[in-house]
Image (tube, helix red, strand yellow):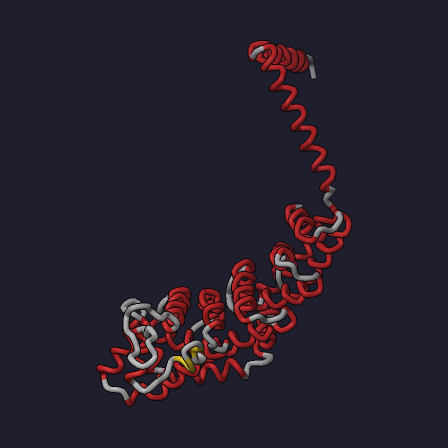
Amino acid sequence: DTQLTNLQIASGYTAEKTKTLLKSYSQLAQELGGTTTEVSSAADSWLRQGYSIQETNDLIKNSMILSKVGQLDSAEATQYLTSAMKGYNIEASNSLSIVDKLSAVDMEAAVSAGGLAEAMSRTASGAQLAGIEMDKLIGYATVIGETTQKSMDTVGESLKSIFARMGQIKAGRLEDPETGEDLSNVETSLGNAGIDLRESNNEFRNFGEVLDEIGGKWDTYNSVQQRAIANSIAGIHQYENFVVLMENYGKALEYATISAESNGTATQKFSIYQESAAAKINKTKAAYEDLSYTIVNTDAIKNFFDTLTSVLNVSKNIVDTLGLIPVIMAGIGTYASISGKNAGKLSMPS
């Protein structure tokens, strides 16, 4: 009934139409190996974001797949998928491609699809603004995560900080003698290493291409140049993660390629889950939820509690008006009367 109420609020449907919708989600839960509660909770989240019923049905399936293959709960999967979609402006109809990418890299690296989804949720918007393709972002997060074994939310925040610093031009730090423009430490250190951060005074280069160039030349730089670049781009707190990325940049690009060529991977992994005992149990739960809602008359339950509330309010009004003693005395009298009758019954011959 709680799920029904939430769905009605989110969809704006009538009570009867919402009941039909909830029953369809129960059937969908049985198909996916989830529970009605999981599916309706995901539906509530997607509907509140303004998606249509058809888009919501697609997104429920895809977030449920991410939930199962990424070992996430339904709410987390919905949250992470939302962040990736919003960050990279991906339509609902293409959302399964995100789960494909995460699942494919999960199979090849020492990170989980759920962990990668969490990392992406921390930095998707910033990465897209910096010109970092999703496949490269997944590659970056993967090599840092599996090498350092840090939590993936920390990895995501680290990349977010790095992308932000690359675009930070600090006024008054350094002035170009020819153009008079203010330069950041990042731009200065990269310029000393023969790499341009901007295409023109008013336009940055694609930061993905800049990182490709740094990663491609990393082994040719001496330790002083490497430290200067790492310190300027990553700062003290993200220094280690940036160096790990540069030293494993070739591996990051391999993971990016795996991500780009991942079509169908999530569905394949999800089919394995659907044959598990957990999926079979959840299907049974969904069927039971559907049966329970069909059998139990929720209107009768609501009426019962409305009546009980009225009785309690009347009792409170009596106490407020007459005081507690008359109520207690009435209760004692009733108890004595009942006890006397029972005692009489007990003294009679069998």
Apparent side of residue 251 relative to residue 307 in the rendered image (left or right): left
Seen as rendered, the residue at the extreme right is: 16
Residue 331, by quadrant, is top right
Q: Where is residue 147 in the image (x, y as percent from the top left)?
A: 35, 76
Between 264 and 300, the one lying in front of the other is: 264
Q: Position of residue 86 (x, y in %)?
A: 55, 66
Q: State the quadrant of the C terminus.
A: top right
Relative height, residue 327 to residue 287 (above, below): above
Q: Position of residue 271 (x, y in %)?
A: 61, 73
Between 4 and 107, the one lying in front of the other is: 4
Between 271 and 93, the one lying in front of the other is: 93
Q: Can residue 80 be seen in this view?
A: yes
Seen as rendered, the residue at the extreme left is: 224
Apparent side of residue 274 relative to residue 139 in the rendered image (left or right): right
Relative height, residue 51 to residue 202 (above, below): above
Q: Which residue is drawn at 61% across and 12% down?
A: 321
Q: Where is residue 309 in the image (x, y as percent from the top left)?
A: 65, 28
Q: Can residue 109 be seen in this view?
A: no
Apparent side of residue 188 relative to residue 88 in the rendered image (left or right): left
Q: Which residue is drawn at 55% across and 81% down?
A: 262
Q: Which residue is drawn at 35% across and 68% down?
A: 150
Numbered marks: total: 0
Seen as rendered, the residue at the extreme bottom is: 220
Between 93 and 299, the one lying in front of the other is: 93
Residue 269, by quadrant, is bottom right
